Every structure is written in C-alpha cells, then in structure tokens.
C-alpha cells in the first residue's frame, strides 16, 4: 500500500502541478491575447495615422505643385511685361532721339531765319536811309530849281 499511496501522492502532485501549469498557461494565453489585442489596436491606430499622413503629404505635394505652377505662370507674365516695358522704353528712347534731332533742326532753322530777318532789317534800314537821302536830294533839287526860276 505504501507504494500505492506514494503513487497516489505523486499522481496528486502531478495533477496539482498540471492544474497549476494549465492555469499558468491559461493566464499566459489571456495575457498574450490582451497584448495581441493592444498591439492590433495600436497597429490600427498607426495605420490610421499613416493614412492621414499620406493624405496630408499628398495634399502638401499638390499645394506645392500648384504653387510652383502659379509661380512659373507669374514669372512668365512678369517676363512678358518686362519685355513689353523694355520694348516701349526703346520706342520712347528712339522717339525722344527723333524729337531731339527735330528740335535741333528747328533751332537751326530758327537761327537761320533770325539771321535772315536781321539781314533784311538791316537792308530795309539802308533802303529807308537811301530813300530819305534821295527824297532830301530831290527836295533840295526842287528847291534849287525853284530858286533859279
């Protein structure tokens, strides 16, 4: 019997150890299931955040692309305006040079006209003086003829 009792004790010990091991495995499984659930939840959260970041990144890329296109269009418009301004400035410069040349020509013509006027004025003064002398000479001749008669 003692061997039988020992075997029963050993069997009871084994059953107790088995029950403890099963309980420990169940607790470990429960802990692992909880950890797995937490990890899956964290994974879902990270996936959501990743998707949100992807959307934000795509939005930022689109905004940057749109801004770059707008800047390129603005730069092209500025270049066109600059070219037009330079073309107009060249036209104005050319026109100013022509006006300056025309003004110089007019100044010379006016100077020549003034010289001609001064020469004609001098000729008229000479003609008036000669006419006055002639009238005086005629009057003197008339007076001498009347005296002689």
Image (spheres, helix red, strand yellow):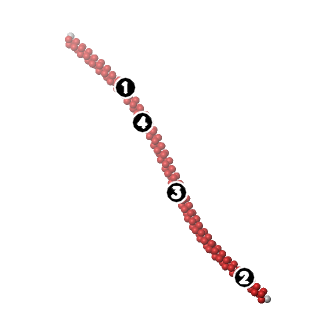
Check disc 4 and report the residue beneath it.
50
Residue 7 vs 87, above or below: the answer is: above
**Which of marks 4 and 1 precedes in the sequence?**
1
Residue 146 vs 85, above or below: the answer is: below
Residue 52 at x, y = what percent? 44, 36
Check disc 3 and report the residue beneath it.
83
85 or 74, which is in the foreground?
Answer: 85
Is residue 69 toward the left or the right of residue 15 in the image? right
Which residue is situated farthest in the front direction here? 147
Q: Secondary structure at mark 2?
A: helix
**Which of marks 2 and 4 precedes in the sequence?**
4
Check disc 2 and report the residue beneath it.
136
Check disc 1 and report the residue beneath it.
34
* Residue in the image at 54% along x and 62% along y: 93
Residue 21 vs 111, above or below: the answer is: above
* Residue in the image at 66% along x and 75% along y: 121
Is residue 27 toward the left or the right of residue 142 in the image? left
Tell which tag, 3 or 2, sits nearer the viewer. 2
Q: Secondary structure at mark 1?
A: helix
Q: Secondary structure at mark 3?
A: helix
Residue 114 at x, y = what percent? 62, 72
Q: CA distance from mark 1 to mark 4?
A: 24 Å
Tell which tag, 4 or 2, sits nearer the viewer. 2
């Amino acid at each position: 019997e003692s061997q039988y009792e020992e075997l029963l004790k050993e069997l009871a010990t084994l059953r107790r150890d088995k029950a403890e091991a099963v309980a420990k495995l169940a607790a470990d499984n429960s802990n692992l299931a909880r950890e797995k659930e937490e990890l899956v939840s964290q994974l879902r959260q990270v996936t959501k955040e990743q998707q949100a970041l992807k959307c934000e990144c795509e939005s930022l890329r689109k905004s940057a692309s749109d801004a770059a296109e707008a800047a390129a269009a603005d730069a092209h418009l500025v270049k066109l305006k600059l070219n037009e301004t330079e073309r107009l400035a060249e036209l104005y410069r050319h026109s100013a040079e022509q006006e300056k040349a025309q003004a110089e020509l007019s100044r010379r013509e006016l100077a020549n006209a003034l010289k001609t006027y001064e020469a004609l004025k001098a000729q008229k003064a000479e003609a008036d003086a000669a006419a006055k002398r002639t009238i005086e000479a005629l009057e003197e001749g008339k007076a001498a003829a009347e005296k002689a008669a």
